[in-house]
Image (tube, grey):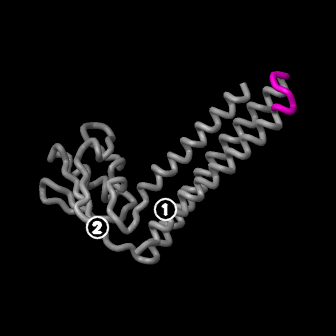
Amino acid sequence: MVQDVIHEADGKMKRSAEALRHNLATVRTGRASPALVENMQVEAYGSHMPINQLANINIPDARMILIQPFDASTIKAIEKAIQNSDLGINPSNDGRLIRLVLPPLTEDRRRELTKLVRTRVEEGKVAVRGVRRTALDDLKQFEQEKLISEDDHRRAQEKIQEMTDRYVRELDQIGAAKEAEVMEI
């Protein structure tokens, strides 16, 4: 019972770390990456779909993203989605391909992106702490219902706190790596 709570909390904290990694992949750095656009939602065929389901995404060099739609009729919709995004890039198309040329980041834009990274890391930490709170509440309820002893409750609490600290450190490391990547010229 206690192990189930700990195991469930560990899984949720691990998913929070993975969600942060996935989320930070969409933050622009000095290099082109398919992750910048692949999950961007496009309104096509009467619903919202990610770009990677509508087109091939290629990176011919460090500063360019090429998007080749499977269906030429979706070019305008993809272009509109990119323009409405927070990437700050104007797409150009030749009727078959959409080219995104990534201009070098200015120092101010790098600082803004670093703040965005820190905000997302903090959101991840809040999620991990929420998992901890839920697990501790479950343990407290088990103790009140006399399903576990006070000692078991205390040991499980310590284990969950250690796990929380470990995942918070991991989130900090993920954020620091992304900040370094953003600040790299």
Residue 81: percent from left, percent from top: 31, 53
**Which residue is situated farthest in the bottom direction here?**
107
- Residue range of the region highlighted in magenta in the rendering: 146-152
Q: SS of the residue at dot 1?
A: helix
Which residue is most to the left? 95
Label 2 sits on a secondary structure element that is loop
Q: Is residue 65 above or below residue 38?
A: below
Picture residue at 82% right of the left edge, 31% below the top: 152
Name the kind of residue labelled 1 in the image: Lys
Question: Could you say which is closer to the camera, residue 5 or residue 134?
Answer: 5
Q: Which residue is mark 2?
A: 63
Which residue occupies the extreme right position in the image? 150
Please state the horizontal and vertical placement of residue 115, each as a whole percent of the image. Answer: 54, 66
Q: Is residue 128 left or right of residue 89?
A: right
Residue, disc 1: 178
Quadrant showing the C terminus: bottom left
Q: Give left or right: position of 141 versus 178.
A: right
Q: Is residue 12 left or right of residue 64?
A: right
Quick one: label 1, few (<14), some, or many (20+) residues within 10 Å? many
Q: Nearer the viewer, residue 48 or 69?
A: 69
Residue 148 colored in magenta in the image? yes
Tell whether position 149 is magenta.
yes
Work out whether residue 125 or residue 62 is closer to the camera in this orientation and state it: 62
Which residue: 72% across, 46% down?
162
* Residue at point 72%, 24% (across, down): 1
Q: Position of residue 32 (x, y in %)?
A: 32, 62
Q: Is residue 5 above or below residue 41?
A: above
Between the C-alphas of marks 1 and 2, the distance is 18 Å
- Residue for point 57% across, 56% down: 121
* Mark sitting earlier along the chain (1/2): 2
Amino acid type at circle 2 is Arg
Residue 19 percent coordinates (x, y): 50, 46
